[in-house]
Amino acid sequence: MHIIVIGAGLAGLTVAIALVKAGHQVEILESAPEITYIGAGIQVSSNSSRILRKLGVDKYIEKYCTEPVDLRMMRWKNGQILVEVPLKEPAENDYKSPYWHIHRADLHRGLLQAAIDFGCKFHLDSRVISIDPDSGSVLTKGDVTYSADLIVASDGLNSMAREVVLGKPGPPVPTGQMAYRVTLPAATLRGIPELEEIITVPRNNHWLGPHGTILSYLLEGQDEPLINFVFTCDVNETDLPPGVDQRMGTAKEVRNSFKGWDPRIETMLGFVKKSLLYTHEPLTSWSHPSYRLVLIGDAAHAMTPYLAQGAAIGIEDAAILGGILSDPRYSCPQTLPAALRLYERLRISRANRVAEASVTSRWFTQMEDGPKQRERDEWLLLHPGIEEGHINIRSDKVWLDELFGYDAYQVLEEALGELPN
């Protein structure tokens, strides 16, 4: 089939690779005049690294990946360690695929090069103005029309295609929180005794506090080791003007938002970018009734960041959709209705479940100080590591098996095996 992918982000490039490797002709429409590599660190858990390895993307990115040994959760005021949850060991032994930290730019660069090498065709500076799902065509700026058997929309949080599928506006929903992000050379913090472990041990450091969390972890980087920080907190009314989702912030702003936190935080601050955090109301369908337009990634299910699964779930979408359309029973235009119904059956409930768990994680980590917080901290101190029924979702063996143990290809194989030949 001839397939158009709207958007050359992480999910868009992953699905393009999966589709072109399945033998389809793939054209990618990207609104930017050139591909730029932006962002900060990103977590690639086992459920998504498994897919990138299967698609052959690992050889493009592996040298830029760090494998964290564990997740350390700490008290906001003084850095007291509440619980340590292993990451590297269960990724290797239980889930059979690594847990990576990587700069988003390095992952994006690797996916782009893989897409080019595998034969995807790119059209830059091709912002989509309108979509006609019944004819399978899109109109881009400059009055250029592209037609295909299927349009896969990976056009992000403010997706235009989402409105076409819904038949009405479907704007993102503010979470009431924002994130400050900064990535800097780890060497910048060298020689400061209290930060030595933070800049040398590959770990997911997580400070829990009222209405906010702080996350730090190491990245390999292109030229030198980097340290990535994410400061998440409630939005103040004057933080960003209407219609503006992000802008550069300052260390002073972060200090004001995190007064009284672990003294090490003050030492680590630099210039940061601030951005509002959004999610989407769950959809009951990700495809247009014509079955010639389908959503993936943030266009279908923008995730809150509290479980670091936004990119991972989009990569899962790509694997499942690409896998279905590689099966001979679903690889032609006439079978698209059945193919997209199967895609929705396998993906919507999974994405909604992870999105809901991410919101739950927010409230668990951002409790106000008080009796419930003290009860939580005491329980964590008495229950280190991973066990079934743990009150911390990131320590609950049952949930981790469901989240990180998810094998898109096994799920697909089982679903396809249930169908008559």
Image (tube, grey):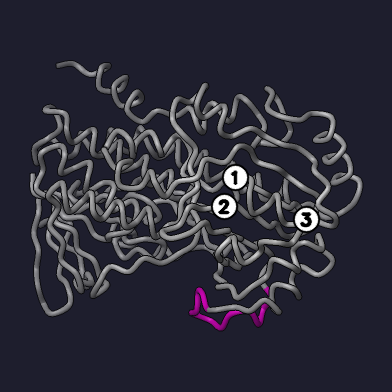
Residue 211 found in image quarter: bottom right
Residue under the image location 80 percent in, 55 percent down: 76
CB of mark 3 within 8 Å of CB of mark 1? no
Q: Secondary structure at mark 2?
A: strand
Name the residue beneath numbered marker 3: 209
Earlier residue among tags 2 and 1:
1
CB of mark 2 within 8 Å of CB of mark 1? yes
The residues colored magenta run 236-247
Classify 160 as above or below 63.
below
244 magenta-colored = yes
Chief SS of the magenta region: loop
Left of 235 or right of it: where is 340?
A: left
Label number found at residue 202: 1
Label number found at residue 218: 2
In front of the other: 415 or 11:
11
Work out whether residue 156 can be spotted.
yes
Classify 43 as above or below 222.
above
Earlier residue among tags 2 and 3:
3
Residue under the image location 36 percent in, 31 percent down: 408
Which amino acid type is shown beneath numbered disc 3?
A: Gly
Classify 254 as above or below 381.
below
In front of the other: 288 or 186:
186
Which amino acid type is shown beneath numbered disc 2?
A: Leu
